[in-house]
Amino acid sequence: VKNIGKKIGLLYDRLWDAYGPQGWWPVTGRRTGSRAVCDADGYHVKNYVLPATPAGRFEVAVGAVLTQNTAWTNVRSVIGFLKKEKYLHPQKILAADLSVLGGLIRSSGYYNEKAKKLKQVAALLSKEKWLQGKAVPSREKLLATWGIGEETADSILLYAFHRPFFVVDAYTRRLLGRLGWLGGREPYHEIQAIFHRRLPGEAALFNEFHALIVEHAKQHCLKNKPLCGGCPVRSLCRRFREDRSGKREQ
DNA sequence: CGCCAGGTGGGAT
DNA sequence: ATCCCACATGGC
């Protein structure tokens, strides 16, 4: 764990060189005047100011809940349904019947659970004018909300409010585990501390780094079949070192 | 078909 | 603290 520090910057550089800026968190329909600042899916490359509106911040929080253990492609279509039906507002979520809300978000999975979670998130974020951007809910407040765990709290802090909290997800665990830098079962805060200790606390950096890990995990570091050919971080990886030194494959 | 997807809360140990 | 499980749909 001691040696991760130097290599973590290298890991970021290799991922950045391979995949480039990721434009997270996708937020639908943002424009400045007549000029689109997002692509069709809501990504906004090298724009670290977005979201900059209450609606945008709320959409990120909703997306963070809906994507829990769920493919983003499913979430994206649900965000579209919610937007079309004008549900991307806390008061609308709070006023909705659970069954109606559940029906709208059905295709994102766990819809009964997530309907309840969205109401909790809406209740929290409609307080204190947090969505207006004058103040930011504390991590403790977020975690005290039923339905918001550590990753979701950090996703909201980082991607809705631009606060430097590194997001640790299953991909992060898998990648650091494969690299041989971690066992992979360490508690969340321990993995997060590695990033917080060794990187400048800049939201834009944490934004890209987490998004790059996700992209890399999807393209090369797959769950059951890692595609090590052409992997941009081979040279940092235990598997590669073991191959070259003739040790057995894991 | 089985596996995977940008987790969380509740309950038992 | 740590493990185990329910929660659920859609894509490949």
Image (cartoon, coloured by chain):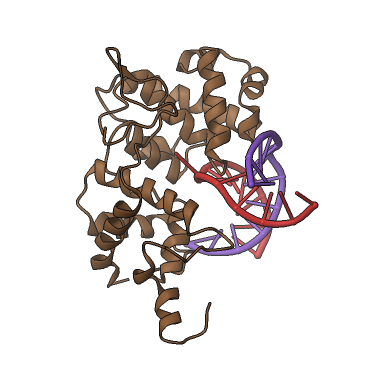
Chain colours: A brown, B red, C purple
Find the residue positioned furthest to the bottom: A246
State left or right for residue A96 relative to residue A139: right
Instruction: Report x, y in % for residue A176.
Output: 41, 63
Residue at point 42%, 63% (across, down): A230
State left or right for residue A192 relative to residue A118: left
Residue at point 41%, 28% (across, down): A42
Q: Is residue A128 above or below residue A1?
A: above
Q: Is residue A84 above or below residue A9?
A: above
Find the residue positioned furthest to the front: A230
Instruction: Report x, y in % for residue A123.
Output: 46, 22
Q: Is residue A241 above or below residue A43?
A: below
Camera sees residue A236: yes
Instruction: Report x, y in % for residue A179.
Output: 41, 68
Numbered-mark total: 0
Q: Quadrant of residue A14?
A: bottom left
Residue at point 29%, 56% (across, down): A12
Q: Quadrant of residue A74?
A: top right
Instruction: Report x, y in % for residue C9.
Output: 69, 34
Camera sees residue A165: no
Residue at point 43%, 49% (across, down): A215
State left or right for residue A135 relative to residue A235: left
Find the residue positioned furthest to the left: A200
Q: Compare residues A87 and A30 and report the one nearer the observer.
A: A30
Q: Quadrant of the N terminus of chain A?
A: bottom left
Q: Quadrant of residue A28?
A: top left
Q: Compare residues A51 and A146 and report the one nearer the observer.
A: A51
